[in-house]
Amino acid sequence: MSQSSVAHSTFSIEREYPQAAAKVFQAFSDPVKKRRWFAEGEGFIVDSFTIDFRVGGKETCLFRIQEGPVAGQICRNDTWYMDIVADRRLVTAYNMTLGDNRISSSLSTVELFSLQDKTLLKFTEQAAFYDGADGAEMRREGWRFLLEKLAKELGG
């Protein structure tokens, strides 16, 4: 694409987990747990994953894609923690880069609601997708996949 463009989108996903909000929140704040459900997985080789979990802190994930149309490319996710309320809320801003091209910038919010012995997680993302890359539906499916991996992490 020779002309620069930006597509804006907002989407939300809700998911219930049969664990307390504190346990769900810990899966975001603990570097070992977060790496397992967020960065690792079939089809990816993680080159680095760092997390400084505090307001103003940064998380960086650098991985190589093994399959599909972008196989061999390096993907980078740079995340900044904007707001953290333990066991209740997490707000981040992040950029995704594929190869040398920034493909998106997003603001994401994770809200945790205690429902007796389980937790309702509400994930909302407001994103700008650059020059036809990625897109809202692909990103929504990516987050659904990650929230399923989170469920497996929580289940032990």
Image (cartoon, rainbow, N blue to C red):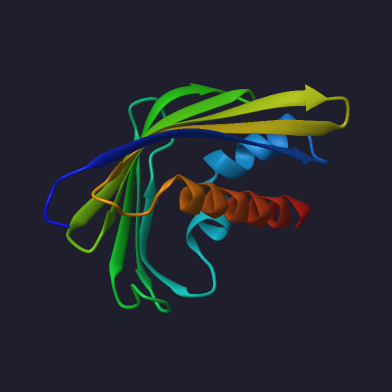
Residue situated in front as seen by the camera: 120 or 9: 9
Looking at the picture, tell me which residue is in the foreground, 46 or 101: 101
- Residue 34 versus residue 32: which sits nearer the camera? 34
Q: Position of residue 108 (x, y in %)?
A: 46, 32
Q: Could you tell me residue 25's position as x and y percent? A: 63, 35
Locate residue 82 relative to residue 90 in the image: left or right.
left
Which quadrant of the rendered structure holds the C terminus? bottom right
Residue occupying the far right of the picture:
116
Residue at the location (52% across, 54% down)? 38
- Residue drawn at the location 22% of the way across and 64% of the way down: 99
Return the x and y of residue 81 as percentages of the image width and height: 39, 31
Q: Which quadrant of the rendered structure holds the N terminus?
A: bottom left
Which quadrant holds residue 27?
top right
Quadrant position of residue 110: top right
Between residue 105 and residue 93, name the one nearer to us: 105
Describe residue 73's horizontal placement relative to residue 112 as left or right.
left
Q: Is residue 64 above or below residue 81?
A: below
Image coordinates of residue 122 in percent, x first then y, are 64, 31
| Residue 21 shown left or right of residue 84 in the figure | right
Count the labels in the image.
0
Q: For this view, does 12 lie left or right of residue 120?
A: left
Which residue does the image show at 15% across and 45% down from the upper left?
A: 4
